[in-house]
Image (cartoon, coloured by chain):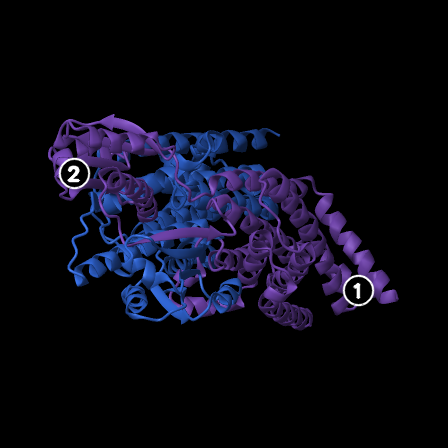
């Protein structure tokens, strides 16, 4: 790089940095948005159900039904409310005041004593299929605990043929926040990276200041580096802030290396900024650039990145589409680095994909910019 | 009469301004439809093709029977048969398997002697929700295995059995939950953006001053600007509803009138919020930012993807001012639970209040900012 080129580059970086410092909106995007969004998501998005309101219909109160109600009451997952008939319980269910009904008919104890023929009717609201499935699991857990204590109180052995001994690795307490918060960082950073460059550059096109830049001796490559460098620093600042919040506010463990995390984040930030740059070059107006960034970054990163919905469970054509979502690779890296540690095959494979995307986005943005200069 | 004519004229002008621009037309039509299709298929919590590896040290028939039951289920794909302890960790670490089932050498012997046999299940807990669901599937298969085994051996079964039935979504399909939610999501995004930018665009283009010197009164300008938002939201919302019913085959069990009353109230509150953003924003960039700063929390705190009841108490209170929260209940209530007006009353009135408050605030801000 010769002296003139260096001077031009420093000049353009200086101009962009001053612009950022004097226009608080990009600083707001880089720092206030991750703060607000991570707080909002970290507290707002949770898959851990607690104190699920449950109607328990006890038609014939006695010791057995009381012990079963007690088992539900002792569980942290349920907040049971006792009804004496199914009609009122059903009304509460229809009004969505309770999520499920456990129905002990009046012959419950009689059947229980007659061995093995008592049945406990359970209805759960299946509208939210995921919550319904998880709740079913919790209900089965309470039932198992109650069966054990029932057998013990009668001095009967009830050997289970096969007992399942689950070991959940990386997240033994099954806290959904531990995988949601790292995933959220990827979703939020996609958005912020793309917004930073797309809105700001589109504004220059709209105001005609881009044309003014084009007639200076600065080259396209220098212009792009000059625009990216300050936003890269801003974006990485936002990223650090998010990681700090994950570690100290949400208590997510970081089991991998911090430096590996930083390197992967830097790579991802370049992809996101490149995407924003490409959007702004194509759209050339803030209305369209803003809409495109929101439409193609936030929702796809939320839904198609595997951060909350498993990619393996999607239909094959959709799985192909997820390969085009940069957040997909970053979510895999972040969830692994935070919860599992430095697992190189995963980090390397996903970083390679990010590197390819970076080259494609920045290359396309460069080519499109060049065309305009000729026109 | 003149008022109506003037509002009508402005509404027509607004619609033309949005629809005549090729790019904004594409933005309004293309992405919502593409997203509905992609998300309708992608946004699912249901698990299938769970990668399962088996480490079976036991030569007996019962262990093979248990493994066969798991691998025969459509939920699981057998990815590896292990013969060594050390193979487990890399499989899980590299995400080649989500589950590893380990049966020790004494499995069949214990089972036949009437002693409880242990089945160890190692689960990748990086996504704790997936881990819990996968555990649930294995548990169901194992419970069936246990029941059959006790019956075959003539042993006494447990004194009481659970009969669990999910209502409204009998097969627990996530899609039935998510697709009605997407209807609300898309309507909110389109309406807020159309109205949120309508004033800022004119301010930037300088045509806003021209609008002010016309005989239109401020309230008429406001109404004229809200009509296109409602119309576009209504048309796009109806189209997505049709897709939900005929393409995704989500059953519509309740009253269509009750649904559209909800749609109308929801659009009014979305337009009110969009216009508030519009009167505050000087530039389109601010408009987009404002719309976005409203949209993201509105979606997250609506119960669209994760239940409101799981949120901390103070966040749950915060959701009460979110119109989308009520609309989600209406959509799912009408689609799946077969609700009509009566059961949805508690959702209508808060949206009506939100609509009145936001529209009046928008009107006040609008007049205030003009002077």
Q: Colour of chain B?
A: purple
Gap in angstroms between the C-alphas marked 1 and 2:
89 Å
Seen in the image, is A251 located left or right of residue B211? Answer: left
Residue at 63 percent of width and 40 percent of height? B246
Q: Residues within 10 Å of mark 1 (few under 14, many from 20)?
A: few
Quadrant including the N terminus of chain A: top left
Vertical arrangement, residue B316 with respect to residue A179, above or below: below
Q: Colour of chain A?
A: blue
Residue at 20 percent of width and 58 percent of height? A151
For residue B213, which numbered disc appears in the image? 1
Q: Chain of mark 1?
A: B
Q: Chain of mark 2?
A: B
Seen in the image, is A5 located left or right of residue B358? Answer: left
For residue A252, which numbered disc appears in the image? none
Q: Residues within 10 Å of mark 2 (few under 14, many from 20)?
A: some
Q: How many marks?
A: 2
Seen in the image, is B236 located left or right of residue A87? Answer: right
Residue B46, image x, y percentages: 42, 42
Q: Quadrant of residue A76?
A: bottom left
Which of the pair A232/B45 is nearer the observer? B45
Which of the pair A144/B160 is nearer the observer? B160
For residue B111, which numbered disc appears in the image? 2
Vertical arrangement, residue B164 with respect to residue B58, above or below: below
């Amino acid at each position: 790089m010769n002296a003139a080129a260096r001077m031009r580059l420093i000049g353009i970086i200086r101009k962009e940095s001053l612009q950022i410092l004097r226009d608080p909106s990009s600083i707001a995007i880089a720092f206030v948005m991750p703060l607000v969004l991570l707080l909002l998501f970290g507290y707002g998005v949770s898959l851990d159900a607690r104190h699920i309101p449950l109607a328990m219909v006890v038609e014939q109160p006695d010791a057995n039904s009381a012990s079963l109600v007690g088992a539900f009451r002792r569980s942290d997952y349920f907040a049971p409310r006792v009804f004496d008939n199914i009609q009122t319980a059903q009304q509460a269910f229809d009004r969505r005041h309770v999520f499920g009904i456990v129905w002990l008919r009046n012959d419950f104890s009689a059947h229980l004593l007659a061995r093995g023929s008592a049945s406990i009717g359970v209805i759960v609201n299946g509208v939210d299929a995921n919550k319904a499935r998880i709740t079913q699991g919790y209900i089965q857990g309470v039932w198992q605990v109650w069966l054990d204590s029932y057998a013990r109180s009668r001095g009967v052995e009830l050997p289970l043929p096969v007992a399942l001994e689950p070991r959940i690795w990386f997240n033994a307490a099954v806290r959904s926040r531990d995988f949601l918060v790292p995933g959220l960082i990827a979703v939020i950073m996609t958005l912020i990276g793309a917004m930073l460059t797309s809105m700001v550059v589109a504004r220059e096109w709209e105001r005609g200041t881009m044309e003014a830049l084009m007639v200076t001796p600065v080259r396209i490559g220098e212009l792009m580096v000059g625009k990216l460098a300050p936003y890269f620093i801003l974006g990485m600042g936002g990223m650090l802030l998010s990681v700090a919040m994950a570690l100290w506010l949400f208590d997510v463990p970081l089991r991998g290396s911090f430096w590996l995390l930083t390197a992967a984040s830097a790579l991802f930030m370049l992809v996101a900024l490149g995407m924003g740059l490409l959007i702004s070059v194509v759209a050339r107006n803030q209305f369209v650039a803003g809409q495109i960034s929101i439409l193609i970054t936030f929702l796809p990163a939320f839904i198609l990145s595997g951060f909350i919905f498993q990619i393996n469970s999607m239909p094959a054509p959709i799985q192909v589409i997820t390969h085009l979502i940069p957040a997909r690779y970053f979510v895999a890296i972040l969830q692994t680095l935070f919860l599992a540690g430095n697992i190189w095959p995963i980090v390397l494979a996903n970083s390679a994909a990010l590197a390819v995307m970076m080259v494609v986005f920045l290359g396309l943005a460069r080519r499109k910019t060049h065309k305009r200069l000729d026109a | 009469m003149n008022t109506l004519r003037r509002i009508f004229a402005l509404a027509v002008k607004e619609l033309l301004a949005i629809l005549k621009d090729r790019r904004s037309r594409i933005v309004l039509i293309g992405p919502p439809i593409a997203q509905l299709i992609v998300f309708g298929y992608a946004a699912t919590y249901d698990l299938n093709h769970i990668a399962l590896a088996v480490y079976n040290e036991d030569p007996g028939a019962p262990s093979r029977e248990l493994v066969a039951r798991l691998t025969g289920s459509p939920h699981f794909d057998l990815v590896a048969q292990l013969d060594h302890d050390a193979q487990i960790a890399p499989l899980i670490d590299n995400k080649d398997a989500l589950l590893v089932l380990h049966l020790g050498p004494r499995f069949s012997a214990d089972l036949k002697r009437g002693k409880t046999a242990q089945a160890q299940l190692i689960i990748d807990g990086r996504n704790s929700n997936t881990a819990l669901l996968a555990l649930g599937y294995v548990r169901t298969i194992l419970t069936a295995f246990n029941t059959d085994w006790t019956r075959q051996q003539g042993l006494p079964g447990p004194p009481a059995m659970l009969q669990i039935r999910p209502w409204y979504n009998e097969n627990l399909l996530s899609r039935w939950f998510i697709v009605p939610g997407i209807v609300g999501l898309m309507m909110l995004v389109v309406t807020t953006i159309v109205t949120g930018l309508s004033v800022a665009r004119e301010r930037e283009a300088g045509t806003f001053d021209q609008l002010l010197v016309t005989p239109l009164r401020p309230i008429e300008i406001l109404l004229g600007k809200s009509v296109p938002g409602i119309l576009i939201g209504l048309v796009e919302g109806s189209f997505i509803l049709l897709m939900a019913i005929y393409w995704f085959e989500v059953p519509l069990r309740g009253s269509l009138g009750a649904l559209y009353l909800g749609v109308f109230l929801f659009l009014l509150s979305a337009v009110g919020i969009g216009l508030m953003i519009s009167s505050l924003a000087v530039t389109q960039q601010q408009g987009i930012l404002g719309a976005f700063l409203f949209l993201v929390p509105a979606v997250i705190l609506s119960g669209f993807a994760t239940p409101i009841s799981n949120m901390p108490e103070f966040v749950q209170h915060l959701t009460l001012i979110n119109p989308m929260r009520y609309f989600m209940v209406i959509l799912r209530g009408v689609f799946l639970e077969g609700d009509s007006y009566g059961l949805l009353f508690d959702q209508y009135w808060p949206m009506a209040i939100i609509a009145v408050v936001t529209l009046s605030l928008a009107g006040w801000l609008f007049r205030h900012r003009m002077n």
